[in-house]
Amino acid sequence: MTSTAQQLLHSQRDVLLEWTRVHPAPLLRWLCDAGVLSHAHYLSLLERSPSNAVAQALETVCASEESSRGFLQVLREVQDYYCEELQVWVERHCRERTEGMKEAKPVRVEEKKKPKSPISKLFKAKSKFTVTPEVKVEEGLKPWRSIKSSHLRVPLSAHRNTLLERTERLTSYAEGGGQAANSASHIEIRYTDLFVTEDNESFDSSQHEYFTLASRRARIYAHQACQRICPRHLLSPQGTTGRPPKRVKVKGIAGIGKSVAVQRLVYEWALGKHMREFTCVFDLRFRELNLIKAPLSLLDLLEDRFRYFKTVLPDLLASPGPLLFILDGLDEFQYQLNWNAPDRDIGVDSKVPVSELIMALIKGSLLPESSVILTSRPSTDAPKRFFQRCCVVLGFEEDQVKEYTSKFYKDPEVSEKVYNYILDNDNLFVLSFIPLYCYIICTALAEFFSSQEDSDSRSLELNPPRTVSEVYYCYLFTAIKHHALKGKAKRNILRSEVLSLVRQQLTNLGRLAYENLLKSKIMFDIQDLERYGLTPVDIQSTFLSQILVPLKEERVEMFSFFHLTVQEHLAALYCAINLSKQGHIIQALDFWCFGEIPPPSTYPTPLLSQDLHLDQTRVENLQMFTRFFMGLLRARLGGQLDGLVLAPLEVGLEGEDISTRLGIWFQNQFKGRQLANQTALNLLHCLMELHMKEVTSKASPEIRSLNLFKIKMSVVDCAALHYVLQFSPHRLEELNLGYSNIGNRGLSRLAPILHRCESLYLRYNCLEREAAILESAVLKSNECQVKKLFMCGNNLGPEGVLELWKALEQNITLEELYLDITGITERGTENIVNCLSKNTSLKTLTIVGNDIGEVGKRRLRELGHRRPGLQIIGNFVDDLGLLNAYLDWVEEIRDDRDQMDSVKNADALQSILKGLRVGAGGENGEGGEGENTAKALELETKILELLNAPTHLAGVR
């Protein structure tokens, strides 16, 4: 008598459940990919316990003969991941059938010991996993199936299971820094793809890494000149060579998702879903490598980290081609790496210092046939010459932010509300592109948008956060409240009462954060904690576990704040609650913003009593900290830090309050200092975070001109600029935003203050037709004071320029208008004669580098006849001053990647070449001789040299 697949599964359900419930991930994922389970059903199963998930899957597949057969086929594919009994069962019952299956007798299974933790399996456990000999697979997709030696199959099977256990859940800081109990932290549910692209840039170590990332994002998004790379394709063949790269570098700031992306890669490999060309993946973290003191060989290192490989490592390393080493977190490596040291002849059994071993592996002098992926923060970079592919992680794009919020909240209504709130708030919108910031924002906003009527948000006594410091404070308070009130029936007690419960611990934690921030120290051992009155017990049993993340190693336990900005925020909170004298606050601001230390006799508090010295780089790196401080100072003045603060702020000697002193301080900075561009922008952000009208009203009148040339500005930067300048009663003599990549959205944020700018520089800002329409409205305004307007290098197009001509018909202030290389065509000149003939103020119009055709040129000549007082420059060769200006400009962009990107985006150099050639004879036949012609030829030569220069010189991707 024969049995169907459906009958077989019904009769064997219990034993199959027993065998597969320990590691359900491979079975469930392969069932989903085979179409046996729907994707939605698969994700819902991941939210269940392992036993429940497998039971539900079996119930589903047993519903039909077709799905039962699909289950058995998948079981043959994934049998490696399970015990020897299951493999025997598969061999007995899962041979391909044409008519039916033999009826099976139930198999009794002995009860097994509870599996050990992932960490113990990684470092100490011996493998108990076995694999079956031959099973049917897609040809060429699973290299480990081609390994004929069974002594390799067994440890490789153990390795894949160990990696699955280690990587299947994302770390959730909302659950104390460990693996969260809630199943939403499963990597398949929570993981959101990242924006990764080729990296061709150097890192500016003088800036806070968040601002450097913002600059890069501004440039990438504005230019759309990048190739997006899916993380699993990092080792895919390259277009130029057709060969896969052997050495790949991935860099990104803290919290951008590098380690999570690596975790996902390892998880997918262990499931057999991606990177199947690799027999084995070794993932090594530099945090672990820091623990190695004595010289060792690669064999020693891998035997220690992956002990189930001890007897087979020589065989594995003998064929290194299909091996992948993932080295995560170079920035955390405590040993110095000498990239210029000559290569040594190192074998897999050569004992050398760990730094030398890792160097050899990265450079390829050790196992050159193997593949290596290295991750690092930009501040600790490895030379590009050792890598065939260099990538940078830029975080999320807008669609991915939406996806992340939908995965974060189970309630779709709450998810939509939170996403819309983020979208409508410039500060949160820009922050949300960094995955860890997105997590903090979602955690901070959760209670404000909860659909539960008895939400705890009442105890917050706050409005939903809108500034950066407010977001972090809400996140911190949420963490404090959940831990401080755990197990208490009354949860809606006052905020000040909650804070008072943790005041001493928060003070100790803040002092740890602040004093070590000044030293650029981010890793702490137990002795460090104890010096600040903190113990490991505190970390494990209080809200502190949500802030400090233990880095558990085999012999040493280290701690760090889970993100640099969390350390910066807690440091700022410590300062905000411990500075109670106005003079002390002013001295601290001088120190933090400019590195100025007060005389020893005037040291205010232990905050500045150390032997401190801040070089310019460290001052730049304190910019986010100073913004946090300003926001928290406002919170203190508003009573939101009650419970932490022991004494009120003292009144000044002459009775002035803190807002008056701060107003004078900011006033003096803008009036008396030659501020660097980035420093000036930081002060604007500080004023926006402080958000006190009386302070900003004192400072803003002193801003008579503002030069932010080549500072890549996000929409939040534009919001800070608008916030401050709106309080100034004066016109702004000059606002230079050239090469700032503000885009249409940034310009619209500045719209209310643009009419007060006498000279407005908006060159190469990736502006389009919408920007021209906005600027036209500014020119039509009765309050318009704009005299010079530079719009060169923006794609305004004919439709946008037509709006500008209409605006100039009635404008009476604009004297100079520069529209070089703005995409004007013949159509863009249709109304130029009619409109500008009526204008009386315009004296100079530059329109070179645009393809306006013969009709357009004729219209310019007609306009010149009607307006003899208007200088019209429509041809490069016509104006010597313009030629000299462009010669200087070409020299300037030669070594400037930022400007070169913007110029390329506008096809500016090609436009100039075309203009030079078209006008070689001059409009009136006079430009072909003399100094103008010589300069034109010189400009053409220099542009051609620049276009033909190597990539690293010209900035060309």
Image (cartoon, rainbow, N blue to C red):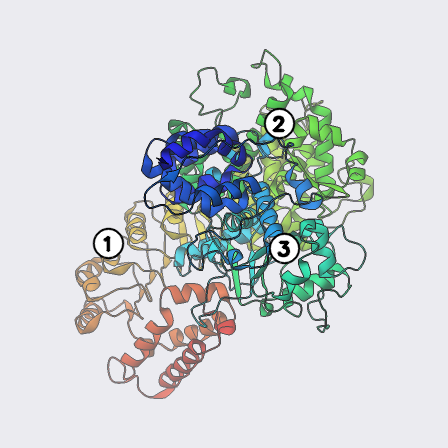
613 over 85 or under it: above or below: below
Q: Amino acid under label 2? A: Arg
**Side of 320 where 40 appears, left or right:** left
User: Percent x, y for residue 388?
Assistant: 53, 68
* Sequence-earlier tag: 1 or 3: 3
**Side of 779 where 563 appears, left or right:** right
Residue hosting label 3:
151
**SS for callout 1:** helix
Tag 1 near tag 3, CB within 8 Å: no
In the image, 241 versus 578, the foreground residue is 241
State the quadrant of the N terminus.
Answer: top left
State the quadrant of the C terminus.
Answer: bottom left
Residue hosting label 1:
803
Q: Quadrant of residue 566 in the image?
A: top right
User: Percent x, y for residue 888?
Assistant: 46, 73
Spatial CA span between label 1 and label 3: 76 Å
Outermost top residue: 489
Tag 1 near tag 2, CB within 8 Å: no
* Sequence-earlier tag: 3 or 2: 3
The local crowd at label 3, few if under 14, some if 14 to 19, many if 20 or more residues have their Cα within 10 Å, is some
Labels 3, 2: front one: 3
* Sequence-earlier tag: 1 or 2: 2
In percent of the image, x 40 and y 67: which residue is there?
904
User: Percent x, y for residue 590?
Assistant: 68, 44
**Side of 630 where 347 appears, left or right:** right
Label disc, if present, on residue 636 of the rendered structure: 2
